[in-house]
Amino acid sequence: MLKKTVLQKFDKELFKNSVIYNVKTLYRKTLEEATQQQIFQAVAYAIKDVIVDNWMNTQKEYAKQDPKTVYYLSMEFLMGRALGNNLINLQAYNDVAEALEDLGIDINLVEDQEPDPALGNGGLGRLAACFLDSLTTMGYSAYGCGIRYRYGMFKQEIRDGYQIEVPDNWLADGNPFELRRPEYAKEVKFGGYVNVYVDENGRNNFKQEGYQSVKAIPYDMPIVGYGNGIVNTLRIWDAEPVECFQLESFDKGDYQKAVEQENLARNIVEVLYPNDNHYAGKELRLKQQYFFISASVQEAVEKYMRKHDDIRKFHEKVTFQLNDTHPTVAIAELMRILMDDYYLTWDEAWAVTTKTCAYTNHTIMAEALEKWPIELFSRLLPRIYQIVEEINRRFIAQVSQQYPGDQNKIAKMAIIYDGQVKMAHLAIVSGYSVNGVARLHTEILEKQELRDFYEMMPEKFNNKTNGITQRRFLLHGNPLLAQWVTDHVGNDWITDLSKISGLKIYAEDEKAQQEFMNIKYQNKVRLARYILEHNGVEVDPRSIFDVQVKRLHEYKRQLLNILHIMYLYNELKNNLQLEFYPRTFIFGAKAAAGYRNAKLTIKLINAVADVVNNDPSIGGKIKVVFIEDYKVSNAEWIFAAADVSEQISTASKEASGTGNMKFMLNGALTLGTMDGANVEIVEEVGMENTFIFGLSSDEVIRFENYGGYNPMDIFNNDPDIRRVLMQLINGTFAPYDTELFRPLYNSLLNTQSTSKADMYFILKDFKPYAEAQRRVEAAYRDEANWAKSAILNVACSGKFSSDRTIQEYVDDIWHLDKVVLPKRV
Ligand code: 26M
């Protein structure tokens, strides 16, 4: 690439030349000849050039200042596109847009060429991405550690109303921002058996033998801080067969094993499991977990030892945050390395490990809990299993001492029980911190799900309410509103979102209200254009944009939303003169590939859309749109255009939610239950600026624990609900197959299905939801008052920055040192 000095101030001509030069050397083309994708690559490399200088400088400064570092260990990083975000954080977006315009290039088209890296399912993976942005912007030394999946989250196509999963070959054109680092490769061992040898010092040496191994190769992606020159690293591991294994194995005549070993390397990083909140117990999944954890922990220890001599003080410079239980084998892997490679005693190794590891819980859904069969776990990870057994043995002894004779306690709390290894128990027992992701969620953990552990070790438990980065979800995603905010309160909000509260004084200002509504309208026009282009549906930007975008899951209750739309349609058809404010219902959601009811709900939404959108008698008053392939890049546009934010999970089930915060930041009003972080949103903005309905978490938990709800009673007594439910099985929306939606009907009423009827209280909450929707409509008719509420939502969103969340993690859990780069000449 073009040689040049670090850009302190953006040098437009240098940048333009760099793009032209890159197109030439990469593709032997002029700008005019290059394809859009080639131009994207050339621009990305020009920007990477700037980033790499900052990256080197940052790492040099870290080496000098030796700050404590957090390793955020996560199976998922849902990064979204890098180019636009990097330009934003380099404070070069507008300059680059102008420079490209000089060259006759539209920056939006260039950004649109980048595949949207989707190495994550949803909330948990996107939270990890927001955290890296905040850590870096706030000047903390951090690594994200994960897997470089060959295929990320599948691309969703809708054919005939059904979801089709298409492989996401995100690396097809290469990833210009990543850096392959073969010099940091690690060996990861699977299977075999453990032998004990007594060495000349009389020490027991545990040796794994007869194993298969895989070489882990790290790829580094730069994480650019906002305006501070700091660049952290997302390190994702690729798998390759270990070198020359074939010769060695051929010598032993073990051809079969050589092939198996090569296949192991090929399979291990092949694909992200597209399940969200659901554990399946697949062997390959455990291999993925140990693969990236072993490599990451090895590297963390080696990096530490390059600069320090006492491994017993590891925890003073390093902390591991476990993003849910998926990386929990890190605990045993660290123990293994400390004991087997550094000869620490059990007690010494335990002292370090329990001061290094901390665990975040993201869900109370029982089906998401990771419980590995002993047979599988011990066969795949024999040495790790020995260590887990010993942790368990010592923990049970401790429980027995504290609760003498209480077998039940042991049954409930043991790490290994009933033939299973319980990863959450391992994480809680072996870590120094356990946190939930919203206040209500942490309370439920303490009082219900993890009650025994909370009683035994209350000092470990703490709450860290989630947050989101305003840099991506306002500054990049909604440039019009971002500029408007800056015009009113200055630009400090970009790195200190609490400053956005300065907008409060404009909430009742008529001019401000009109400006705000105008910006919202323009964003709705932008989304309407996207919908027309991608879905072929025409929507009216003057209608209310009522949006539910998130993974498809029964507890998130997209079914409640679409059943209510069916009810509204019935009402309109009954009385075509009905006062009805035009509404566009927008859905976006991917269903796990094997989740029948979730996939059927997508079909139902599309079937209802087909009927409603094409019924001229209702005069276009209701439109239903299912946006195909909901992902980070189109999410930014969707949040910017929303009037109503649907956050309607069964109370107690949504640990936090983060989409709710992105909508709020963009001035949408929350229509939701008192669940997850909605509770705190209401607290910040005031009940009167939201639409809250439905059962409370206490009520739901009471029903679950003591019974007492029969959906059949509601069906029998409410003709509106009965009519809607009958339409699921009488062919109203599927005349060609009247039985099509029977499983959804059964999930609500039946008895025959294996699980309880209406487990998620959809019928119970239906009428309160419909009533809340009527309040939405009435409120929207009063435009000034709506604008006031919307502005207040933006103004009160300060708490929900991931910068605030990260500062709390730093203060209460990690205790990192802040790094400031010296001014550069
Ligand atoms: C488990 C086993 C096998 C395959 C996949 C999984 C798995 C993957 C993702 C399980 C759970 C996964 O994610 C859970 C998740 O995204 N939870 C969400 O976390 C957000 C961030 O804290 C919260 O805001 C959401 O409320 C919560 O649902």
Image (cartoon, helix red, strand yellow):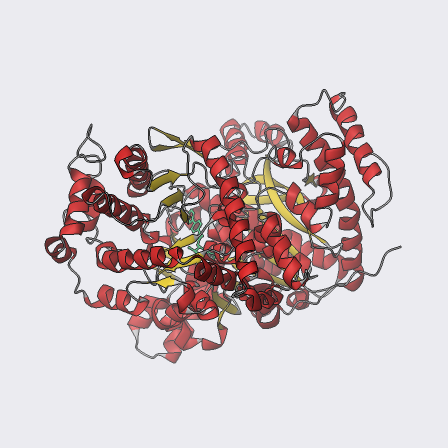
Return the x and y of residue 423 as percentages of the image width and height. Answer: 43, 58
Q: Is residue 61 above or below residue 111?
A: below
Nearest to the observer: residue 500 or residue 350: 500
Nearest to the observer: residue 340 or residue 470: 470
Return the x and y of residue 106 as percentages of the image width and height. Answer: 67, 33
> Residue drawn 68% across and 63% down?
492
> Residue drawn 20% across and 27% down?
736
- Is residue 261 visible in the rendered image? The answer is yes
Among the 4 quarters of the image, the one containing residue 348: bottom right
Among the 4 quarters of the image, the one containing residue 502: bottom right
Q: In which quadrant of the rendered image does the C terminus lie?
A: bottom right
Q: On the picture, is 473 further left or further right than 703?
A: right
**Residue positioned most to the right:** 825
Return the x and y of residue 289 as percentages of the image width and height. Answer: 50, 48
Q: On the picture, is 609 further left or further right than 211?
A: left
- Is residue 194 visible in the rendered image? The answer is no
